[in-house]
Amino acid sequence: MVELVLTGPYTGILAYGCFAIEIDIPQAASSSSGNKHNSTKWEWEWDCDDPKHAAQVDIMQPAHGIISTPDGRKVAKVTYTVMSDALEATVQIRLGLKDGYSPGGISGEVTARIDGFENKHKSVLFRRAKGKGQRFSTTNDISWLLLELARNVVAVPRGRMLHTVVNLKIEADDGKKVEVNVPLRFENGICSSKTDNGKEVQVEVTWYPEVNFESKRLVCKH
C-alpha cells in the first residue's frame, strides 16, 4: 500500500453516532489495478452500535478499518481516532523573508502529534519532495509568507497538548539554502504564535470552539 497525505478536512469531522468514509478512485487507476466493477467508489462505515467500534472512543491510540470491493479486494486501510470531546486546532506556518529574499524551493514536511500518542502516530500537514513547486499566500506582514499546507486542522482532546515539528529545507532565489527543524508545543485551547530562534519559521495555532479561561482572563477566538 501507498501512504497518502490527506488534503482535508478543513474542519473537524463531527458526528453524532455513525460516520462513513468513501474512497473515489479514478477509472483509469481502478482499471489498471484489476477492478472489474463499473463503480469506482467504495465506502467504509464506523458504526456506533458496533461494540468493537464503541470501545475505540477516547482510547488515545489509532484504530484501523479496511475498505474493500464487493469481491473482497482490499482498496485502502483507514487509520483513525474517535474522540468524544475535542477542539479544532488550526495550524498556520509562515516563512520569514530574511534579508529581503523570497523562498524558492521548499522540501521536507510539517507534522502534528497529540500529547499521549506515540511519535509514529503523527499527522502529516505538509510533505513535499525536492524540486516540487510550492504555493504561498501573502500576509499582512510583508516580511512573512504563508505556507499552504495540505491540511491545517487537527482534532485535539480537551486537556491535551499539540506538538508540531517543522522540518524544511528552504532554497532562496539567490541560491542560499536554509535548513529548519523546529519542534514546538502548544497548550490546549490557548491561542499562541511561536517563532524559532533564527526567525525563519513562525507557527501559529488557533482553537475552535471558543475557549474561555476565566482565571487567566483569556478568550481565544477562531
Image (cartoon, helix red, strand yellow):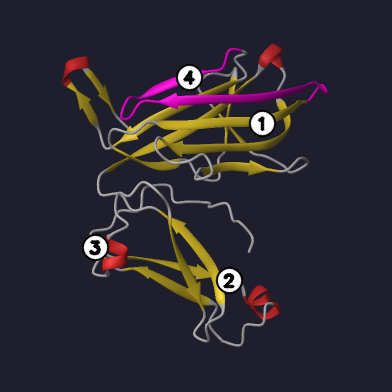
**In the structure shown, which secondary structural element does the residue marked by tag 2 occupy?**
loop
- For marks 1 and 2, give the CA distance: 31 Å
The residue lying toward the viewer, choosing from 162 and 119, is 119
- For marks 3 and 2, give the CA distance: 27 Å
Question: Which badge, 1 or 4, comes first in the chain's sequence?
Answer: 1
Residue of label 1: 168
First to last magenta residue range: 173-197
Front label number (1 vs 2)? 1
Question: Which badge, 1 or 2, comes first in the chain's sequence?
Answer: 2
- Residue 66 is situated, as x and y percent measured from the top left of the image, at 48, 69
Label 3 is placed on what type of residue? Gly
Dot 2: within a 10 Å radius of its alpha carbon, few (fewer than 14), some, or many (20 or more) residues?
some
Label 1 is placed on what type of residue? Leu
* Numbered circles on residues, count: 4
Residue 178 included in the magenta stretch of the image: yes
- For marks 1 and 4, give the CA distance: 16 Å
Residue of label 3: 17
**In the structure shown, which secondary structural element does the residue marked by tag 3 occupy?**
loop
Question: Which badge, 3 or 2, comes first in the chain's sequence?
Answer: 3
Residue 184 included in the magenta stretch of the image: yes
Residue of label 4: 194
- Residue 222 is situated, as x and y percent measured from the top left of the image, at 33, 33
Dot 1: within a 10 Å radius of its alpha carbon, few (fewer than 14), some, or many (20 or more) residues?
many
Tell me what residue is drawn at x 37 percent, y 70 percent. Answer: 45
Residue 175 located left or right of residue 180:
right
Front label number (3 vs 2)? 3
Question: Which badge, 3 or 1, comes first in the chain's sequence?
Answer: 3
Numbered label attached to residue 25: 2
Query: In the rendered view, would you say 221 is above or below 118?
Result: above
Question: Which badge, 3 or 4, comes first in the chain's sequence?
Answer: 3
Tell me what residue is drawn at x 56 percent, y 80 percent. Answer: 73
